[in-house]
Image (cartoon, grey):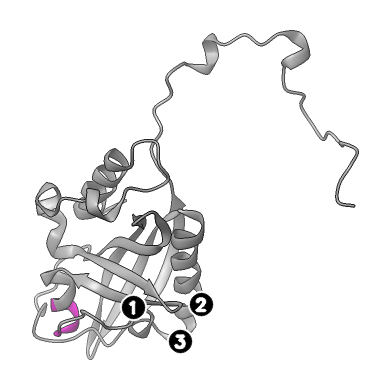
Amino acid sequence: MKHSSSRELFAYWNERRGQRPAPERADVDPGAIRGALGDSFILALDDGEARFRLAGTRVCALFCRELKGASFLSLWSAQSRVAVDALIRAGSDESAGSVAGAVGYVTDGQVDLELLLLPLLHRGRQDARLIGILAPLKIPYWLGTEPVRELTLGVHRHVGPLVSPRVSRSHITLPTESRPRRGLVVHQGGRT
């Protein structure tokens, strides 16, 4: 993650989730991520579509409008929508976070952005909310005066919870019959 807002939100999200796949929406305290709030947003996944529930001031300034209620996919180019939708589904269905590069196009130029999408539980439901960051890597001089017309998705990868190992693997000795075998192992059985 390149942007400080992405790193701040990811660290807070990971801390708040504990042993769960994702934290509850109610567990997120906006004051705790004060530095990232302007670049953050929350998406609600209702009726199969991701819509902005909240959007920070700098996210709205990129598009020169309030984004609450707007479709998240509508901001993306036609070529990027399938991939962005897959990132949303990975977050909602599999509790997998994603970080990606993106490019925002304005009339006479472009801006490089970072996108972070992280799942949130909402009243126990895994598929209801995502929290994220959409931040320019370098703040453009035109921010708030010229709207980004569309976004394209760049390189992306899944990010997961940070897990601190309690025991170093180098100190574990498995009995000979329990040691993992290297190579391909075929087990009999399967679907009937």
Q: Is residue 104 left or right of residue 54?
A: right
> Residue 189's spot in the image, x, y percent?
89, 42
Residue at which label 1 appears: 72
> Residue 148's spot in the image, x, y percent?
23, 83
Q: Is residue 29 left or right of residue 172?
A: left
Looking at the rendered structure, the kind of residue marked 3 is Ala
Q: Is residue 21 left or right of residue 112?
A: right
Residue at which label 2 appears: 82
Secondary structure beneath disc 2?
helix
> Residue 154's spot in the image, x, y percent?
42, 68
Secondary structure beneath disc 1?
loop
Looking at the rendered structure, the kind of residue marked 2 is Val
For the residues marked 2 and 3, what is the alpha-carbon distance in whole angstroms? 8 Å
Q: Earlier in the sequence, mark 1 or mark 3?
A: 1
Instruction: Read off the magenta span.
Output: 61-65
Residue at which label 3 appears: 78
Q: Nearer the viewer, residue 16 or 161?
A: 16
> Residue 10's spot in the image, x, y percent?
29, 48
Secondary structure beneath disc 3?
helix
